[in-house]
Image (cartoon, rainbow, N blue to C red):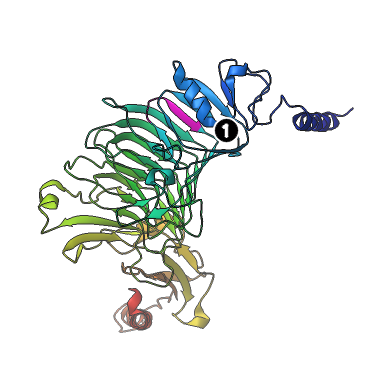
């Protein structure tokens, strides 16, 4: 029997066993952990587990974990489990491929969702749904990371889950976040890892309030490699502490508008809000992917922004920073906005170092979309003189027009001479920095080399050749000036 046939037969045998044997579940490992708890719809799986370790609801397993020292691993079989609960002792809550679904509800009274209220908690591989209909606000969130009375909640991992927040709005507040931490002016939680999750509203048409909220009161929080998509009233809201802060890294934000990440919340201490936003992908926004209010930004680098401008507005920006106002004593005394410098805002292909502006008494600076294209011509700038294909470029601009060094760093050496015919030399014009100009052009014109004839008798050497070269040069300059006049809005 071939190896392939053996593998096929083994897979078929496992499938038949799972279908007909009541003691086997595809969600549970074959080897039973005698110390673990198991949850399945019938409460009978796996058959080899001790009877006191098998439960029909997640709530019962969490309650049993709290009845002793805690620290159990709770494996959850595929199925739907309704209800809300508080986690008050360390636990690992593990599902498989999002097939185990926890549906938050407003019941039992006072629970209103899933609450983490102790250290050393892992939630992995589950689908957690916020409550989709009007109820108390906590049930709309997927996970609430709260606090330990009189202590600091530490070491929480939320990994590889499908988190689907609900949404409800009233005049007092909007609710419906995948994850929310407790707001405090003191540190109440630290060492939180949110990794590899998919976040999207439970009701795509209604949407949700925000993807996640990391409030002041948390430090050393890392949100990385998550995929956030769908409709939200506002973007993820993040803050942090000077010594630890929040790192938003390697995430994919798809279509979250009007803002995707808001680095904000300063309140009474200007040291709140140390945030890093690095290596994320932002796509399909209609306004501002990253909005920096009065957080203390440490670094915004290596992010990519695509499809920001949708043609409906000329105010689309990649990053907007709020610099305070002249009337609010709080902003005057406590807000110490940092001017971006160096690599803080190193996000290609967007313009850095725009002028500050004031709107409704508030001061801002925007970091605006910027791309450029290279177009090559032979002899003159005319449609029938265009040679080669148009090359698109992206460069990190630092308040100055594109120059040769920037383009070379972006496109590599040799871009100027990419289509240069033999016997020609290169003339180049560069675009000026302008906000929201998608078609800024670097014009490369190849002018024919004009041989210098030997001087005639009685003629000063070089007179006629110099006149001929200057004439040819002025012809090219005249045509380029005509180009500038035609497309002045782009330069």
Q: Secondary structure at mark 1?
A: loop
Left or right: residue 80 versus residue 135 is right
Q: Is residue 407 above or below residue 40?
A: below
Q: Residue at 47%, 52% (x, y): give it.
A: 133
Q: Nearer the viewer, residue 281 or 99?
A: 99
Looking at the picture, how far across and down is residue 43, in whole percent? 63, 27
Residue 166 can be seen, yes or no: yes
Percent from the top left, x then y, of residue 351? 32, 60
| Residue at x 17% of width, y 43% of height | 270
x, y (%) of residue 170? Answer: 34, 56
Q: Is residue 81 left or right of residue 217?
A: right
Residue holding disc 1: 95
**Which portion, as a residue range, is magenta?**
117-123
* Residue 77 quadrant: top right
How many neighbours does mark 1 have within 10 angstroms: few (below 14), some (14-19), or many (20 or more)? many
Is 118 magenta? The answer is: yes
- Rendering quarter of residue 299: top left
Residue lying at the far front in this picture: please name it: 109
Which quadrant holds the N terminus?
Answer: top right
In this view, the residue in front, 216 or 292, is: 216
């Amino acid at each position: 029997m071939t190896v392939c046939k053996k593998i096929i037969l083994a897979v078929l045998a496992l499938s038949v066993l799972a279908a007909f044997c009541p003691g086997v579940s595809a969600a549970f490992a074959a080897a039973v952990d005698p110390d673990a708890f198991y949850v399945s719809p019938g409460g009978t799986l796996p058959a080899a587990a001790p009877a006191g370790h098998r439960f029909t609801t997640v709530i019962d397993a969490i309650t049993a974990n709290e009845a002793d020292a805690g620290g159990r691993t709770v494996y959850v079989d595929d199925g739907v489990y309704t209800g809300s609960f508080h986690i008050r002792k360390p636990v690992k809550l593990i599902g498989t491929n999002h097939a185990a679904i926890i549906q938050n509800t407003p019941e039992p009274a006072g629970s209103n969702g899933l609450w983490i209220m102790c250290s050393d908690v892992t939630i992995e591989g589950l689908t957690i749904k916020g409550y989709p209909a009007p109820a108390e606000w906590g049930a709309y969130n997927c996970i609430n990371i709260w606090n330990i009375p009189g202590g600091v909640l530490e070491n929480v991992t939320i990994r590889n889950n499908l988190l689907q927040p609900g949404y409800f709005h009233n005049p007092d507040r909007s609710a419906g976040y995948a994850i929310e931490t407790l707001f405090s002016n003191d540190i109440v939680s630290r060492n939180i890892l949110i990794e590899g999750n998919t976040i999207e509203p439970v009701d795509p048409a209604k949407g949700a309030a925000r993807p996640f909220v990391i409030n002041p009161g948390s430090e050393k929080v890392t949100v990385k490699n998550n995929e956030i998509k769908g409709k939200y009233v506002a973007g993820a809201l993040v803050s942090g502490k000077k010594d630890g802060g929040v790192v938003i890294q390697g995430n994919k934000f798809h279509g979250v508008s009007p803002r995707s990440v808001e680095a904000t919340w300063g309140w009474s201490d200007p040291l709140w809000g140390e945030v890093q936003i690095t290596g994320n992908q932002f796509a399909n926004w209609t306004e501002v992917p990253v909005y920096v209010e009065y957080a203390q930004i440490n670094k915004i680098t290596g992010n990519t922004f695509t499809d920001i401008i949708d043609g409906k507005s000329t105010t689309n920006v990649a990053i907007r920073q709020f610099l305070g106002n002249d009337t609010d004593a709080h902003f005057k005394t406590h807000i110490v906005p940092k001017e971006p410098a160096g690599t803080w805002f190193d996000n290609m292909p967007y313009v850095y170092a725009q002028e500050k502006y004031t709107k409704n008494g508030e001061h801002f600076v925007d970091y605006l979309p910027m791309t450029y294209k290279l177009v090559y011509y032979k002899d003159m700038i005319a449609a029938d003189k265009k040679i080669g294909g148009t090359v698109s470029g992206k460069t990190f601009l630092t308040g100055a027009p594109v120059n040769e060094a920037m383009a070379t760093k972006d496109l590599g050496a040799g871009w100027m001479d990419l289509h240069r015919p033999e016997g020609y030399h290169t003339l180049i014009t560069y675009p000026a920095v302008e906000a929201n100009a998608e078609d800024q052009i670097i014009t490369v014109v190849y002018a024919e080399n004009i041989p210098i004839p030997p001087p005639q008798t009685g003629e000063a050497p070089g007179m006629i050749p110099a006149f001929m070269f200057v004439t040819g040069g002025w012809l090219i300059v005249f045509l380029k000036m005509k180009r500038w006049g035609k497309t002045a809005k782009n330069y």
